Image (tube, helix red, strand yellow):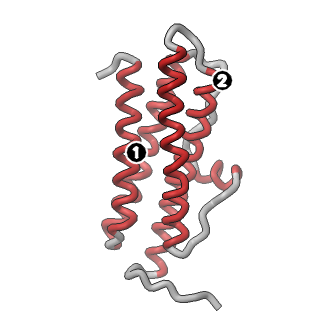
Amino acid sequence: MAEKIDIGISDKDRAALAQALSKALADTYALYLKTHGYHWNVRGPNFSSLHALFMDQYTEQWAALDEIAERIRALGEFAPQSGGAFGNLTAIKDGDPENGWEAMVGELKTDHETVIATLGDVIALGEKVGDDVTVDLATGRRTAHQKHAWMLRSTLGAK
């Protein structure tokens, strides 16, 4: 018999929030993997600075994965945990280690924008159902991804 979860959110809304967070988790995981891979494979005249930038970003994303997964569990649902499950949930494509540094930076910028949009959906749903905890988590994550996207845009010389 399943234990009743009483955190002020209906079962239906908790399931919907967990599904939205699962997509955010999958997007974050895919972006983490791509960023880490690009950290290993970047080359060119600004190798050292990009290698360090990518490491800063993937390290921050790694810690965030646990926060997102634990929120899904706190909502009473199971977090996705396999490559196949993440692949089915994410819109982020695998990186190509043969890309030049500009393509790597451009892809990562676009991928952060994808995660920002996904988190916007989480925030909207959380606000609709009155889940301030999920809204707070997603807002913090969105702030981090906006900063990462800004740093990547600036690396490309964009505004």
Q: Amino acid at mark 1?
A: Ile
Question: Which residue has dot 1 on it?
Answer: 116
Q: Give the spatial CA distance, label 1 vs label 2.
A: 24 Å
User: Residue 83: percent from the left, percent from the top?
Assistant: 69, 50
User: Residue 20: percent from the left, percent from the top?
Assistant: 48, 61
Q: Amino acid at mark 2?
A: Pro
Q: Residue at x 53, y 31 (%)?
A: 55
Q: Residue at x 52, y 49 (%)?
A: 63
Q: Earlier in the sequence, mark 1 or mark 2?
A: 2
Question: Which residue has dot 2 on it?
Answer: 97
Quadrant of residue 127 in the image? bottom left
Q: Residues within 10 Å of mark 2 (few under 14, many from 20)?
A: some
Q: Is residue 119 left or right of residue 43?
A: left
Residue lying at the far left in this picture: please name it. 159
Q: Residue at x 35, y 70 (%)?
A: 131
User: Residue 133: percent from the left, percent from the top?
Assistant: 37, 67
